[in-house]
Image: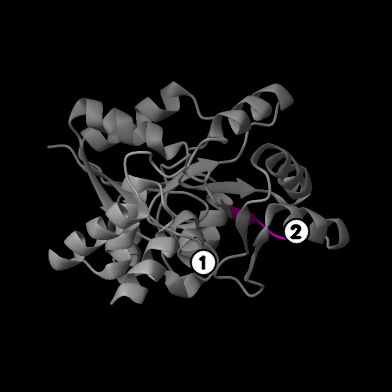
């Protein structure tokens, strides 16, 4: 009987965010696949966990992955972790999940902190829909193409960025997107956690005078949607009322009607409150 692969989230900065289930899983599995064994060893030592670590990172070969899968297929249980947060999202661990899925091996998730969701939650922007873009490409041509493709994206966009590249990224996004709102989330859950809410041009100006420090998550406002020709503001408000009458909260009803009509959620909410 084969074992199972456990996808285990780990703290993104504050070790107190570890869960009891994560600790139990890391103790009980037969071995742990880690993006950087040195980082994971510090985590294990902090919680006095003794277990075998196997290195699995973006430079690992298909043969490395196959050896891990063979061990699981033979009956061993394995946990896969990344340096911080949820593994297997823009992370080499996804290869192991795909191989397990192909071979019918059980994959279980032990969820934990996520920098993406945490940043969206504290952004102060309309978080009804968002897209995770990770790190933008480094080559200039591919970078320009990717940003150009995203100009018409109406959902919030979430980017990761290193401090030494932040200024260039803010300049590129401002040039392509115009002056949209952005939340710059720095060192989330750590001692120097900071969330700056401003526009892209303000952020670009701010970081010409202030040195970027720490790892950043950028939450950028999506493109504005032009009001649909087939729906007036009155019709959009009627839609809000229908949804509220059916049991939805006014804020949720306005979000839904905004997506359907093209009007802004705040605009519909204000109009709805005035008519109450």
The percent coordinates of residue 220 (x first, y second) are 57, 51
Q: Residues within 10 Å of mark 1 (few under 14, many from 20)?
A: some
Question: What label does residue 124 carry, if any?
Answer: 1
Colouring convention used in this rendered image of the protein:
one colour
Query: For the view shown, which residue lies furthest in the right direction?
Result: 209
Is 21 left or right of 264, judged from the image as shown? left
> The residue tagged with tag 1: helix, strand or loop?
loop
> The residue tagged with tag 2: helix, strand or loop?
helix
The percent coordinates of residue 96 (x first, y second) are 35, 34
Report whether residue 70 is seen. no
Is 193 left or right of 123, judged from the image as shown? right
Q: Is residue 108 above or below residue 93?
A: below
The percent coordinates of residue 104 (x first, y second) are 17, 31
Report whether residue 101 is seen. yes
The percent coordinates of residue 184 (x first, y second) are 63, 60
**Mark 1 / mark 2, whichever is N-terminal:** 1
- In terms of image quadrants, where is residue 198? bottom right
Residue underneath mark 2: 202
Q: Which residues are magenta?
A: 213-218
Residue beneath the point at 28% across and 51% down: 109
Front position in the image: 189 or 104: 189
Front position in the image: 66 or 234: 234
Looking at the rendering, in which quadrant would you find the C terminus?
Answer: bottom left
Residue 89 among magenta residues: no
Q: Is residue 99 above or below residue 251?
A: above
Residue beneath the point at 34% across and 74% down: 273
Is 2 left or right of 36, judged from the image as shown? left
């Amino acid at each position: 009987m084969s074992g199972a692969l456990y996808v285990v989230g780990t703290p993104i900065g504050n070790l107190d965010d570890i869960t009891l289930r994560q600790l139990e899983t890391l103790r009980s599995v037969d071995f742990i696949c880690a993006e950087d064994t040195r980082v994971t060893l510090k985590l294990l030592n902090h919680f006095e966990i003794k277990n075998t670590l196997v290195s699995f990172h973006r430079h690992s070969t298909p043969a490395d992955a196959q050896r891990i899968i063979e061990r699981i297929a033979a009956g061993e249980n394995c946990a896969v972790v990344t340096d911080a947060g949820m593994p297997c999202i823009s992370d080499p661990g996804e290869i192991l999940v795909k191989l397990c899925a192909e071979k019918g091996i059980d994959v279980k998730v032990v969820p934990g902190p996520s920098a993406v969701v945490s940043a969206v939650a504290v952004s102060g922007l309309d978080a009804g829909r968002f897209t995770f873009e990770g790190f933008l490409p480094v080559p200039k041509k591919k970078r320009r193409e990717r940003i150009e493709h995203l100009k018409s994206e109406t959902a919030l966009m979430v980017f990761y960025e290193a401090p030494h590249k932040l200024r260039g990224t803010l300049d590129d996004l401002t040039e392509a997107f115009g002056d949209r709102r952005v939340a710059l989330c720095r060192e989330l859950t750590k001692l120097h956690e900071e969330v700056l809410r401003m526009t892209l041009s303000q952020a670009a100006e701010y970081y010409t005078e202030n040195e970027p420090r720490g790892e950043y998550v950028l939450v950028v406002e999506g493109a504005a949607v032009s009001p649909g020709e087939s729906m007036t503001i009155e019709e959009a408000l009627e839609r809000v009322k229908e949804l509220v009458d059916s049991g939805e909260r006014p804020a949720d009803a306005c979000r839904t009607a905004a997506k359907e009509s093209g009007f802004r959620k705040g605009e519909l909410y204000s109009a709805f409150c005035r008519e109450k």
